[in-house]
Amino acid sequence: SFYGDGDFWLVKSSTVSIQARFEGTKYTEGLAATNQIVVGGAFLHGHKIEVGTLDSGILTVDGQQVIAGFPGSYSGAGFSVTYDAQGEVPDVVPEGNEKRVVHMDLPL
């Protein structure tokens, strides 16, 4: 269902591959929300960027942690990833939590 857990393709083409994992959370009363996203494909020359929730600690390129602290950034072959508090978020940041945003500057 629309609110169910699972892994789904958001984009699947010969150039770009984007998958997302959706899982229920305490904030959504068990309804599925984005838990992790993976970006890869030919446009990244075989590289794979994974971003998970703050709790998961997943922020990797090719399976390797690339940003150890907050804020931080990483530059790869034709792309960059920045982790900071700048930008808009789709939901209200719960009281007592800091806003954390991952930006990807990708070649397409």
Image (cartoon, rainbow, N blue to C red):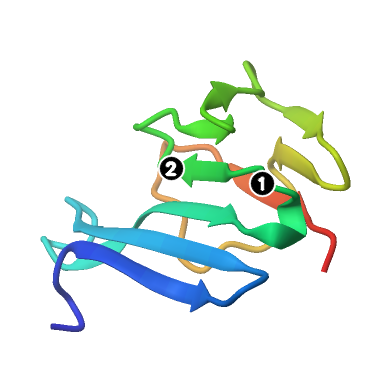
Q: Residues within 10 Å of mark 2 (few under 14, many from 20)?
A: some
Image quarter of residue 75:
top right
Q: Distance between the Cα atoms at labels 1 and 2?
A: 20 Å
SS of the residue at dot 2? Answer: strand
Q: Earlier in the sequence, mark 1 or mark 2?
A: 1
State the SS at label 1.
loop
Q: Residue at x 63, y 68 (%)?
A: 16
- At 35% from the left edge and 32% from the top edge, which residue is drawn? 55
Amino acid type assigned to the residue bearing label 1 in the image: Gly
Percent across and percent down for residue 67 are 66, 23
Q: Which residue in the structure is indicated by mark 2?
A: 52
Decide which of 60, 45 is in the foreground and name it: 45
Tell me the quarter of the image containing the C terminus. bottom right
Q: Nearer the viewer, mark 1 or mark 2?
A: 1
State the image coordinates of residue 94 (x, y, percent, origin top left). 39, 49
> In front here: 48 or 32?
48
Residue 90 is situated, as x and y percent measured from the top left of the image, at 52, 68
What residue is rendered at 16% in x and 64% in y? 5
In the image, what residue occupies the spot 43% across and 36% down? 54
Pinpoint residue 79: horizontal percent, then vertical percent. Answer: 82, 47
- Which quadrant is the N terminus positioned in? bottom left
Left or right of 63 in this view: 49: right
Q: Is residue 40 above or below residue 84?
A: below
- Horizontally, residue 66 falls left or right of residue 33, namely right
Residue extending farthest to the bottom is: 2
Q: Which mark is residue 74?
A: none
Residue with the mark numbered 1: 46
